[in-house]
Image (cartoon, helix red, strand yellow):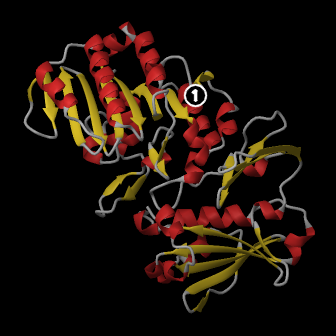
Amino acid sequence: MKLTYKMFITVQYINLNKQMIKRHLQDWLVFIRLLYQPEQMIVNHEKIQSFSLKKVHHLLNHLTEQEDLEFIVKNGPNESYFHLVDGNLLEKHLISQDIFLTNQQMILNYIEVKMSKRGLFGYIRSYDEYLYHNTDEIEMRQVFQPLSEIEKLPKIRNKENETVVDCNQFAGYDIFYRGFCLTSCWRIYFTSRYHKIIPLAVLEEVQQVEQVTKTAEDVWFVELYKDPYRWQEELNLGYQRLFRDQMGIDQLAWDNGVGILREPLIEYAYTDNIIQTVQYQNDRLQPTPKKNATHFVTRVFDIVHGNYQEKRVKGVLNAQAYFPWIDEQGMKMMNYLVLNPQYSLDEGFCAYEFYLRNYLEINVTDERYHEYLAILTIYLPDDFLAKVPYKVLKEEMKDVHFTRLKKRKQRVYFDIKKGENHLRVNFVGFSAMKNTNEISHVGG
């Protein structure tokens, strides 16, 4: 891989008034001039021009909360950027290795202080690591990666029907959930506002990281490993993956239509203003995939009232861990998925096989599972109901017994069985969904 050795810094601020905006941008400018001498600047996509401190001060003096302004300054490989929209500010810096190493402690102090001033999220990471994990266009990846390596990476179709790399499969992929950025990289900064999607106890108790540190009343940072320039080492890539999985980022959001097809280390459930999480651990109380778990940490957090409950138990999974909705009268236990296979090169085949096995090949002993009908409902775009690869699934999953495919209005279904385990699989069109919000969440 062709490396730049640059460092990438991002800080996101929200709900700033005019005075705060002016102060942040003054600090931004001072920070830049401590790092390097600006030579060029670009204002709102206009033609590049020589840097002028007089013009910058003029901009600062006329800013408002409603401003929509992009500003970039440069000097050789170094570049700094801010984007102000309706009182929200995004600050970014790309700096060379020598500048970062010379000023590392000052940079770390700057980010910690700025995060306490209406910061929402921030990170510091190798720019090469960021590019590797977030560049999906094949032509753009060829700038830093040989085509022979790109060909081995997972692929999907994008909205323009072009084949691109599926960055959802990478530990350092940046994705947004309910307006919050989620990722895994060298240093990640969170504020307490993240409690709206993730109980902060999950963050504070994350395992196998270099450090989790509270730097202000409502600011934490996580450092995954010591040296950000050694991100490519197998051990550090493992820490990066483990942090992402412990936080359950890929359980909350993906944009490839089908998910990441791995067992979770943690699962989330949201009801009104309540967040419930279940973390899965082994006998050493370390994070482990769900089906291997022997210890469970359940957290319930009331966002509105701030009430928090935590329970730690040893045991085994029961059927309700896979099928949480129970119909006692109809003797059914149910779960559902929302998938959009239009982005998959195989029209969803690998995803279907993964989820069918995931909900069929379960080791549960409670009697209710054997007495009730276990149902997995998979919601799909309506035009994919006719494309369910029933014959191919039956052919590939030779160890599983399939009943005949049956078609009803707005759905198709079949039953599968392996040993004593059983599952009814319903495929239902989006148009039949009651909660259409789920479509936008999962559909890409």
Q: Is residue 101 above or below residue 282?
A: above
Nearest the camera: 27 or 434? 27
Residue at the spot 51% in from the left edge and 73% down from the top edge: 436
Q: Residue 276: x percent and y percent?
A: 71, 52
Left/right placement of residue 304 relative to residue 227 reads right
Q: Residue 321: x percent and y percent?
A: 78, 60
Nearest the camera: 341 or 91? 91
Q: Is residue 115 above or below residue 431?
A: above
Query: Given the image, on which type of amino acid does mark 1 rest?
Result: Trp
Q: Residue 89: x percent and y percent?
A: 35, 37
Q: Can residue 320 be seen by looking at this rendering?
A: yes
Q: Residue 95: x percent and y percent?
A: 30, 20
Q: Is residue 199 above or below residue 114?
A: below
Q: Quadrant of the C terminus?
A: bottom left
Q: Residue under circle 1? A: 220
Nearest the camera: 76 or 20? 20
Left/right placement of residue 226 relative to residue 11 reads right
